[in-house]
Image: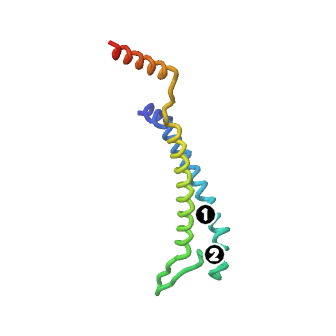
Amino acid sequence: MLKEFKDFIAKGNVMDLAVGVIIGSAFTAIVKSFTADFINPILGIFTGQIGLSSFVITVGKAKFLVGSFINDLINFLIIAFVVFLIMRTYNRLAKRDTTPKDTKTDTLLGEIRDLLKDQQNNK
């Protein structure tokens, strides 16, 4: 069982997934910083508040953290857009590489096929 687990972990897909998760979490931290340190001050100019996270709606004893939700929504939209761009580029490159290229063997086999057809037609 330990050998099977080792083989499973050593497969490329699992390692690729691990790298993707690590890079994704680092990228998320960068996007959160971008939102908090760049976008929020710009929006604060228009809303009159330092940052959106301080925007709270209180109804009775309930507090709705609307600003925090908007920050998370902005983070999600930025990350989703970047992932979209990455996947679109990847799909375009993958589509380009899947076109089969004629090898010398393919060319020779095609010529042999054509010669055999000509021989059968001449009989």
Camera-side residue of 68 and 42: 42
Residue 39, placed above or below residue 107: below
Name the side, left or right, on which 45 lies relative to 15: right
The image shows residue 80 at horizontal and vertical percentages of: 53, 59
Name the side, left or right, on which 54 lies relative to 3: right
| Residue of label 2 | 43
Camera-side residue of 70 and 15: 70
Q: Residue at x 65, y 77 (%)?
A: 44
**Which amino acid type is marked by label 2?**
Leu
**Which amino acid type is marked by label 1?**
Lys
Q: Earlier in the sequence, mark 1 or mark 2?
A: 1
Name the side, left or right, on which 61 lies relative to 36: left
Task: Mark 2: give few (<14), some (14-19) or many (20+) Cα within 10 Å.
Answer: some
Camera-side residue of 41 and 22: 41
Residue 120, placed above or below residue 28: above
Q: How many marks?
A: 2
The image shows residue 96 at horizontal and vertical percentages of: 53, 40
Query: Which quadrant, please, contains the C terminus?
Result: top left
The image shows residue 85 at horizontal and vertical percentages of: 56, 54
Q: Residue at x 56, y 75 (%)?
A: 67
SS under mark 2: helix
Query: Which quadrant, please, contains the N terminus?
Result: top left
